Amino acid sequence: MKSIKRQHKSAADIVILVFMGFVIFITLYPFLNVAAKSFNDPLDTVKGGIHILPREFTMANYTGLFEAGSNLPAAFTMSVLRTIVGTVTGVFCSAMFAFTLSRRDFMFQKVFTVLLVVTMYVGGGMIPEYILIRNLGLINSFWVYIIPAIISAFNVIVIRAFIDNVPFSLQESAKIDGANDLLIFFKIILPLCKPVLATVALFIAVGQWNSWFDTYLYARGAKGLSTLQYELMKILDSAQSAGSAVDIHSEGLRSARRNPEAIKMAITVIATAPILMVYPFLQKYFVSGMTIGAVKE
């Protein structure tokens, strides 16, 4: 009887492993396919049939990108800088706002909550936003990447929902011990909110890293403020324009070497890789709870 149960258990384990392996494969396949095409010879990529491994390995797509965009290293530095500064300030300011809205003794709690939610559904539009940023003197300034996005209504609501689950008796006991609001915020709320802060930090970092339209609108006049995504967008647009205007009979192999599809895949890898490297360091906070051992209501 025990041997039969063991056989059924082992068969079930095999089925689960096969199923999970299939799920992992279909999840990773798009990424592997993009990477394979980015490392494959552009002329060979036109023929199709590239799956998870390059057929003719080459670094030409990446070297071509850096040859076409001489400003890429400086743009990469600017993207990293705006991502770090924007993420730190965004998380900190959103957490402070969320903590204020979570306080039961805050007189205007409901009013500010309603105003915050309204901003998620009603916006002034591009032209009023541009006029406001121009009047604030943020055009061609590094702070145009930081200040307009420093507070997100969605992030504030997410953090506040997490703070509401933290026992309020922790704050009351700290008050009795003589702690003020700032001490409660830094010593109690922030440490207990690490999971949600890490999640919000990833949201903000991805948004800052992928953003290029604000550079196009507000900072394209300043060469030192150009970001990686904006430079890659210009290269891709140039490659697609050249590809559509190319005469295959006159250009021959040389035109195929500028295959926009191969350039697009290389750009995708360059734009995605930094975020993929950061994600594992934040993943553990997504599923971990930080209130174990605290006072329970």
Image: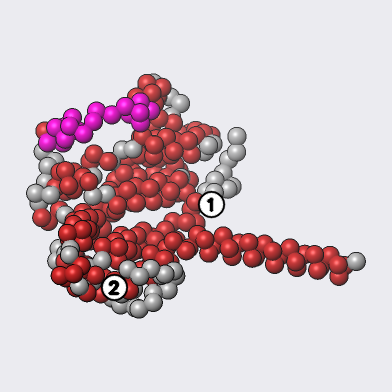
Dot label at residue 43:
2
Q: Can residue 129 be found in the magenta stretch?
A: yes
Residue 74: image x %, image y %? 17, 62
Whether residue 270 sits left or right of residue 185 in the image: it is: left
What is the span of residues highlighted in magenta in the rendered image? 116-134
Q: Nearer the viewer, residue 294 or 120?
A: 120
Q: Is residue 139 visible?
A: yes
Q: Amino acid at mark 1?
A: Ser
Specify the color scheme. secondary structure
Q: Secondary structure at mark 1?
A: loop
Alpha-carbon neighbours of circle 1 within 10 Å: few (<14), some, or many (≥20)? few
Dot label at residue 288:
1
Q: Nearer the viewer, residue 247 or 76?
A: 247
Residue at 41% x, 66% y is: 33
Q: Is residue 118 above or below residue 72?
A: above
Residue at 42% x, 50% y is: 198
Dot label at residue 218:
none
Residue 3: image x %, image y %? 86, 70
Q: Secondary structure at mark 2?
A: helix
